[in-house]
Image: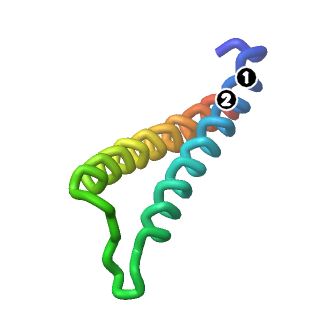
Amino acid sequence: MNMKHQPILFVAGIVSFLLGLIIRYYTGRRRFNRRTPFGLQQYRSYNEALATRSGEGCARVIGTLLALAGLVLIFVGLA
């Protein structure tokens, strides 16, 4: 690989890794804050529950993929 592209890949890897971790943290925090003292999640309606769970599920998958892609880019940038 061309030497001048390695720093760009390294920085892009760090940015995507951190963005993935932030997305996963934010979705986990929202899930934690919705819990009652008994461990149940509270929603105002069934539709809200469906939308929230599917949206957060997609966000967690995207966050995981971003973090993994970031790790790959970091290692490629270091090579």
In the image: residue 43, left or right of residue 37? left
CB atoms of marks 1 and 2 within 8 Å: yes
Query: How many marks overall?
Result: 2
Q: Could you classify mark 1 by the number of other residues whose Cα lies within 10 Å: few (under 14), some (14-19), or many (20 or more)?
A: some
Tell which of 45 and 69 is nearer to you: 45
Q: Is residue 43 above or below residue 17?
A: below
Which quadrant is home to the N terminus?
top right
Q: Which residue lies under the disc numbered 1?
A: 8
Disc 2 on helix, strand or loop?
helix
Inter-mark Cα distance, 1 to 2? 6 Å
**Which of 65/25 is in front?**
25
Question: Which mark is drawn over residue 12?
Answer: 2
The residue lying at 54 percent from left, 55 percent from top is 26
Q: Position of residue 24 (x, y in %)?
A: 50, 53
Q: Position of residue 7 (x, y in %)?
A: 76, 25
- The quadrant holding residue 20 is top right
Pinpoint residue 50: horizontal percent, then vertical percent.
25, 51
Q: Is residue 73 left or right of residue 59?
A: right
Please give left or right for residue 16 compared with residue 32 in the image: right
Residue 61 in the figure: left or right of residue 8: left
The image quadrant where one finds the C terminus is top right
Residue at x 45%, y 46% (from the top left corner): 64
Which residue, as the protein is rendered here, is positioned at the far left? 46
Graded by Cα atoms within 10 Å as few (under 14), some (14 to 19) or many (20 or more), the crowding at tag 2 reads: some
Decide which of 49, 12 is in the foreground and name it: 49
Q: Secondary structure at mark 1?
A: helix
Q: Amino acid at mark 2?
A: Ala
